[in-house]
Image: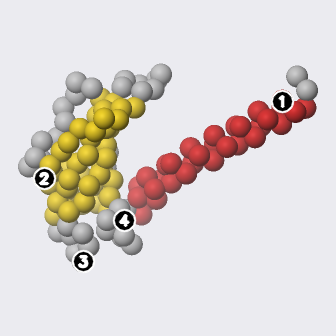
């Protein structure tokens, strides 16, 4: 293996690492700084996307419209995307889910735990 191949491999590893850090940045921020709240499921629809991993079961991606209860000065209705393992229970309209809300941007919401 010559030095060009080693440099190429190092650059590829650095790019993959940077991309993985970017995709998890919002979740890490909300886990650290987010305000816990409750969202009532208004509507849920399955998307055509799914996530497959060699270490975990395949997950289908769902779009969930949530009405944030007790939302102050922010959006009371938000849409989040979340993956559920195929065959597992999926929330239904009327269910209440725990969420993390960005204190600076109430439209930025993720499902907690």
Q: CA distance from mark 1 to mark 4?
A: 43 Å
Q: CA distance from mark 3 to mark 2?
A: 20 Å
Mark 1 vs 3, N-terminal side? 1
Mark 3 vs 4, N-terminal side? 3
Q: Relative to 12, is 110 above or below?
A: below
Mark 1 vs 4, N-terminal side? 1
Q: Are marks 3 and 2 in contact (CB under 8 Å)?
A: no
Q: Relative to 113, is 57 above or below?
A: above
Q: Relative to 42, is 16 above or below?
A: above
Q: Nearer the viewer, mark 1 or mark 4?
A: 1
Residue 17: x and y, percent?
Answer: 63, 42
Q: Residue at x 29, y 60 (%)?
A: 36
Q: Nearer the viewer, residue 33 or 11?
A: 11
User: Which image quadrant for residue 67?
Assistant: bottom left
Mark 3, secondary structure of its residue: loop
Mark 2, secondary structure of its residue: strand
Asked whether residue 35 is in view, the answer is: no
Q: CA distance from mark 1 to mark 3?
A: 54 Å
Residue annotated with mark 1: 5
Asked whether residue 50 is in view, the answer is: yes
Mark 3 vs 2, N-terminal side? 2
Q: Relative to 97, is 75 above or below?
A: below
Scheme by which the image is coloured: secondary structure
Q: Are marks 1 and 4 in contact (CB under 8 Å)?
A: no
Q: CA distance from mark 3 to mark 4?
A: 13 Å
Residue annotated with mark 2: 42
Identify the mark at residue 102; answer none if there is no mark. Answer: 4
Q: Nearer the viewer, mark 1 or mark 3?
A: 1
Residue annotated with mark 3: 73
């Amino acid at each position: 293996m010559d030095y060009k191949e080693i440099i190429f491999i190092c650059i590829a590893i650095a790019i993959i690492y940077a991309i993985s850090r970017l995709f998890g940045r919002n979740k890490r921020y909300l886990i650290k700084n987010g305000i816990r709240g409750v969202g009532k499921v208004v509507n849920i629809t399955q998307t055509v996307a799914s996530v497959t991993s060699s270490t975990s079961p395949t997950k289908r991606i769902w779009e969930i419209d949530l009405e944030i209860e007790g939302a102050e000065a922010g959006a009371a209705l938000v849409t989040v995307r979340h993956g559920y393992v195929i065959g597992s229970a999926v929330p239904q309209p009327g269910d209440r889910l725990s969420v993390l809300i960005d204190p600076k941007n109430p439209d930025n919401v993720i499902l907690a735990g």
